[in-house]
Image (cartoon, rainbow, N blue to C red):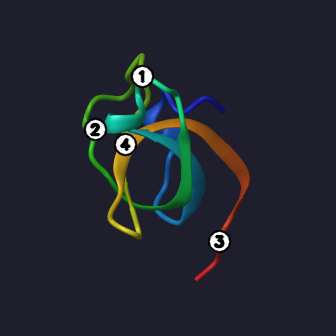
């Protein structure tokens, strides 16, 4: 999954996001989704999320395994 569909993203899912300051380099940051910030059902650049560590960025990759709480 590439992270452009909101229905694919759920809190607790492990994802790789690109932070605003890393958009030019394309550097990805991995983490666990805390909040989904994009309201539209899809976004061509990726759904914007907040990770549990507070980082905000657009999802570029969704990992198949999540984290159970």
| Residue 11: x %, y % from top left | 46, 61
| Residue 25: x %, y % from top left | 49, 26
- Asked if residue 12 is positioned above or below residue 68 in the image, the reply reads above
Assess disc 4: are there few (<14), some (14-19) or many (≥20) residues with their C-alpha within 10 Å of its C-alpha: many
Judged from the image, the secondary structure of the residue bearing numbered disc 4 is strand
Judged from the image, the secondary structure of the residue bearing numbered disc 2 is loop
Nearer-N-terminus badge (1/4): 1
| Residue wearing tag 3 | 67
**Residue 45, picture quadrant:** top left
Judged from the image, the secondary structure of the residue bearing numbered disc 1 is loop
| Residue 65: x %, y % from top left | 74, 59
Instruction: Say which of marks 3 and 1 sits in front.
Output: 1
Q: Give the distance between the C-alpha atoms of the residues marked 2 and 4, in whole angstroms.
A: 10 Å
Instruction: Say which of marks 2 and 4 sits in front.
Output: 4
Pick the front one: 22 or 16: 22
Residue 24 tag number: 1
**Residue 1, picture quadrant:** top right
| Residue wearing tag 4 | 57
Nearer-N-terminus badge (2/3): 2
Please tell me which residue is depicted at 42% across the width and 22% down the height of the picture. 24
């Amino acid at each position: 999954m590439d992270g452009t569909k909101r229905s694919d993203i759920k809190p607790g899912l492990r994802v790789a996001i690109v932070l605003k300051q890393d958009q030019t380099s394309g550097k990805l940051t991995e983490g666990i989704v805390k909040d989904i910030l994009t309201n539209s059902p899809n976004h061509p650049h990726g759904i914007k999320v907040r990770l549990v560590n507070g980082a905000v960025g657009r999802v570029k990759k969704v990992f198949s395994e999540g984290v159970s709480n």
